[in-house]
Amino acid sequence: MKNNHQKLYALLVVLFISAALHSCKKDVLPVVQAEAATSESSDLAKVNLPGRTLAANCFQCHGTNGHAQELEIAGMSSSEIINELNDMKTKNPGANIMNVHALAYTDAEIKLIANFFSKQ
């Protein structure tokens, strides 16, 4: 019975995050599309790094721009972040909050987030 409650709770968390993301999609999507169109060779001092808007969700635990003492992800390679998030997508959402977060992002969004943190 406890296992069923955990599954139900995990499902509700995923649904809540999905609904929250969907409700703000009209606000975030144009930013994501604009960031994806930004050339990586642009002068990064003048242009917001692609993915920062999406990565801001990570700042709560991983620190601003990914600089947190124990959970620092700033400077990790883009491919390492992509691999870890994709791995988390395959795991039980009830086991770890990161599994839930990973499920909420598309492959393109994960790539933008990973690219942002790799440049920090």
Image (spheres, helix red, strand yellow):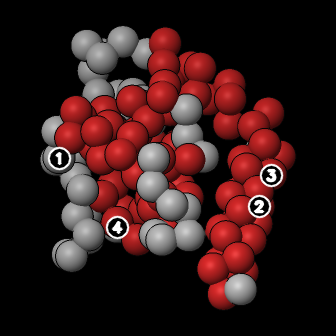
The answer to whether residue 37 is visible is: yes
Circle 4/circle 3 CB separation < 8 Å? no
Residue mark closest to the camera, 3 vs 1: 3
Q: Label 1's element?
A: loop
The answer to whether residue 20 is visible is: no
Q: Which residue is mark 2?
A: 16
Lower sequence index among marks 1 and 2: 2
| Marks 1/4: CA–CA distance | 14 Å
Circle 1/circle 4 CB separation < 8 Å? no
Classify 88 as above or below 69.
above
Q: Label 4's element?
A: loop
| Marks 2/4: CA–CA distance | 23 Å
| Marks 3/1: CA–CA distance | 30 Å
Q: Label 3's element?
A: helix
Q: Which residue is mark 1?
A: 76
Circle 2/circle 3 CB separation < 8 Å? yes
Q: Residue at x 17, y 46 (%)?
A: 76
Q: Position of residue 91 (x, y in %)?
A: 45, 55
Farthest residue, direction bottom: 2
Residue mark closest to the camera, 2 vs 4: 2
Classify 72 as above or below 82.
below
Residue mark closest to the camera, 4 vs 3: 3
Q: Position of residue 5 (x, y in %)?
A: 72, 80
Q: Which residue is mark 3?
A: 19
Lower sequence index among marks 1 and 4: 4
- Relative depth, front residue between 63 and 92: 92
Q: Label 2's element?
A: helix
Q: Which residue is mark 4?
A: 63
Q: Residue at x 40, y 51 (%)?
A: 88
